[in-house]
Amino acid sequence: MRKLNRIHVIAFAAVMALAIAVPIAIAQSTGAGGQRHEMRGGGHMAGAGFRNLDLTDAQKAQMKQIRDSHSQSLAPLMEQIRSKRQEIRQASESGTFNEALVTQKLNEIAPLEAKLMGERSRLHQEMLSVLTADQKAKLEQSQAQRKAKWAEGRANKKNSK
């Protein structure tokens, strides 16, 4: 029975990791103007999606200002999540699995992740407000192409099994 509970906790942790990874991947693919490393500490909105929109210098400056203003709220959330994940790893590395501690830390992480997703969504919406109608249409087209390519890759992977 203990092994089954451990499997449940590990499965839950994997689902939580996916719940974090997917929004990050989406944010990176719909990010803004410069390089991804510009936004360490929370700015995953600097990905390839906005790069090919022919932003004006003024738009690039606005995007940077938006990213900088949001990094102040994103960075502490990301640090709290990172710290709690580290505590989970440390609890698992000791050789004995403390299910209660892991569950407690996952329960502490969940609201932080929800808040982080909300902050990233606000960041994305602010960045979209800088774009012209043509740039938004180009971004949507690019996103649709990436989604189709992703789905095609998933289908190919599934068929090769």
Image (cartoon, rainbow, N blue to C red):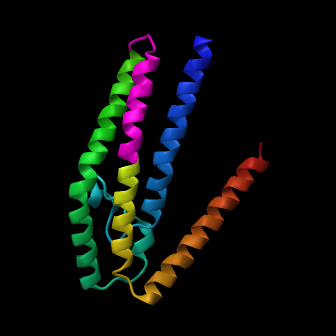
Residue at position x 46%, y 82% in the image: 136
Residue at position x 62%, y 60% in the image: 150
Image vertical order of residue 103 relative to residue 147, above or below: above
Q: Main secondary structure of the magenta part?
A: helix
The quarter of the picture where the C terminus appears is: top right
**Is 104 in the magenta?**
yes
Visible residue check, residue 72:
yes
Most foreground residue, 139 or 129:
129
Quadrant position of residue 67 = bottom left
Image vertical order of residue 147 relative to residue 102, above or below: below
Question: Which percent across, then down, holds residue 75?
Answer: 25, 50
Quadrant position of residue 57 = bottom left
Range covered by the magenta-colored residues: 94-113
Residue at position x 51%, y 84% in the image: 137
Visible residue check, residue 44:
no
Question: Which percent across, then down, holds residue 87?
Answer: 33, 26
- Total numbered badges shown on the rendered structure: 0
Position of 47 with respect to 152 (left or right) is left
Most foreground residue, 117 or 153:
117
Most foreground residue, 131 or 50:
131
Position of 146 with respect to 117 (left or right) is right
Quadrant position of residue 10 = top right
Residue at position x 56%, y 78% in the image: 141
Question: Which percent across, then down, holds residue 1?
Answer: 63, 12
